[in-house]
Image: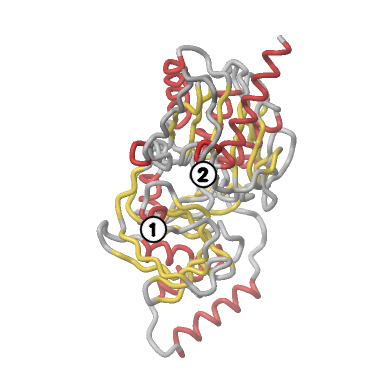
């Protein structure tokens, strides 16, 4: 089929609880009218459909409008295919385009459907969901006093959206929790800063991408240049943090990958029709001039994050560290229909440069590092020789013990910085990534 208009490529894993529905990974496109499949109509099944429609109209306990019955039938057809295919009504389709700009209203949570419940893929940093303690893997079983079981994902998302400043209570089933948790969140306008950065140590930078938006690739280049300026020279290495990044705009994911690759394939897709098959390759130029990269991923890293991690891993441009990613490797195409609504249909799978499909399998890290927190040891409060009564003096009159700083004078090491993440000393995975970078940098220097 020929595309009449191609708007934008996006890779959101599920739906954002924001002002509208966000598509998974998709090609926002319009099909040329009149180019329908030549497959014969299934007349027996259509007769069955007509019979069921008639019986509902005649016998259901309350009158039901034809429009509702037919829209529900369309929704059922699509939701029965896979978790990512859906029917977008006119309002959802219109608002969907607005949300790709990085600002929307809601809770700031990326969700999908699992066994009839809403599953949290990732709470977005600095949003009501993240501040309220919602975690990746949580199952939302009730919204206020309404059970989620039996709802469509679109219906659940609509319930969680609402006017900023209003509250909603989520009842959550969490692995390891003895009973469901109730978390009350206040809806807000969600503004996403997709790229954040800081220096870890002299020569070693840290960049976190919270999601892939239009302009994220340019933002990445800008913050790397700033890190280099702050370091007064080229970086010796960089950590790229994609943990809990649910995806975003495909063009941004390709641009981020391209920033570190001189050549070669970044990603390709395979589907039944020609429009669903494409190959995207890198242009010459490496923004870090070959400096080592460690990419951090976890179970909340999905779609666009997996494209970047897979491309850099296959080209051996970066070491992937952390835990296995989510495994969202399918492509959804958005097809507008005559009533202003749209169909979101899975049309292809995407593959890493080496030909790996990560659909339902995810990216396996090169080095597994489980998520953990590093806590300060209490060793500083232990007795020392100098604390013992009648201890033997040092013998050097000039040597005087240094005074321990008072507790109130010590800096609060737990304070988060502008990236929204705790310092490397408290983040085990980040500390391991920094140690690896320093080791690679050391051995490179020794070999030159």
When the figure is inspected, residue 79 is found, relative to residue 229, above or below; the finding is below
Where residue 136 appears, as percent x and y from the top left, is 53, 56
Q: Which residue is mark 1?
A: 132
- Could you say whether the residue bearing mark 1 is in a helix, strand or loop? loop
Res 225 quadrant in image: top left
Where residue 380 appears, as percent x and y from the top left, is 51, 41
Q: Which residue is mark 2?
A: 376
Where residue 370 appears, as percent x and y from the top left, is 63, 48
Res 46 quadrant in image: bottom right
- Foreground: disc 2 or disc 1: 2
Crowding at label 1, few (<14), some or many (≥20) Cα neighbours within 10 Å?
Answer: some
Res. 368 mark:
none
Q: Quadrant of the C terminus?
A: top right
Residue 237 visible? The answer is yes
Where residue 60 appears, as percent x and y from the top left, is 45, 88
Q: Quadrant of the N terminus?
A: top right
């Amino acid at each position: 089929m020929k595309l009449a208009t191609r708007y934008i490529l996006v890779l959101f894993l599920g739906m954002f609880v924001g002002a509208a529905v966000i598509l998974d990974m998709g090609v926002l496109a319009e099909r040329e009218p009149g180019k329908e499949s030549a497959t014969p109509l299934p007349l027996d099944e259509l007769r069955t459909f007509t019979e069921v429609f008639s019986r509902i109209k005649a016998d259901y306990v309350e009158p039901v409008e034809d429009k509702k019955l037919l829209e529900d039938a369309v929704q059922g057809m699509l939701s029965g295919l896979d978790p990512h295919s859906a029917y977008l009504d006119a309002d959802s389709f219109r608002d969907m385009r607005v949300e790709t700009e990085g600002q929307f209203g809601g809770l700031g949570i990326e969700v999908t459907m699992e066994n009839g419940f809403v599953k949290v893929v990732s709470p977005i940093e600095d949003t009501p969901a993240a501040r309220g303690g919602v975690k990746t893997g949580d199952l939302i079983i009730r919204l206020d006093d309404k059970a989620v079981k039996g709802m469509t994902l679109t219906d659940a998302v609509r319930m969680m959206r609402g006017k900023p400043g209003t509250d909603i209570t989520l009842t959550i089933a969490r692995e390891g929790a003895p009973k469901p948790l109730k978390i009350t969140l206040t809806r807000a306008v969600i503004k996403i800063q997709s790229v954040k950065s800081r220096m870890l140590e002299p020569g070693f930078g840290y960049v976190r991408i919270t999601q892939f938006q239009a302009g994220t690739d340019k933002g990445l280049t800008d913050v790397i240049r700033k890190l280099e300026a702050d370091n007064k020279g080229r970086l010796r290495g960089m950590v790229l943090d994609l943990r809990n990044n649910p995806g975003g705009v495909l063009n941004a994911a390709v641009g981020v990958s391209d920033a570190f690759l001189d050549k070669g394939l970044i990603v390709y897709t395979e589907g039944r029709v020609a429009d669903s098959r494409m190959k995207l390759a890198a242009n010459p130029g490496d923004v870090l001039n070959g400096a080592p990269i460690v990419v951090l991923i976890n179970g909340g890293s999905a779609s666009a994050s997996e494209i970047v991690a897979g491309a850099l891993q296959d080209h051996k441009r970066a070491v992937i560290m952390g835990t296995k990613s989510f495994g969202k490797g399918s492509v959804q195409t958005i097809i507008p229909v005559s009533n202003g609504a749209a169909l979101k249909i899975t049309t292809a799978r995407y593959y890493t440069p080496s030909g790996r499909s990560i659909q339902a399998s995810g990216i396996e890290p090169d080095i597994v590092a489980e998520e953990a927190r590093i806590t300060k040891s209490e060793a500083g409060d232990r007795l020392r020789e100098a604390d013992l009564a009648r201890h033997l003096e040092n013998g050097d009159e000039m040597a005087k013990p240094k005074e321990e700083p008072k507790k109130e004078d010590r800096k609060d090491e737990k304070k988060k910085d502008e990236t929204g993440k705790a310092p490397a000393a408290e983040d085990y995975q980040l500390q391991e990534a920094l140690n690896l970078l320093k080791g690679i940098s050391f051995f490179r220097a020794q070999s030159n």
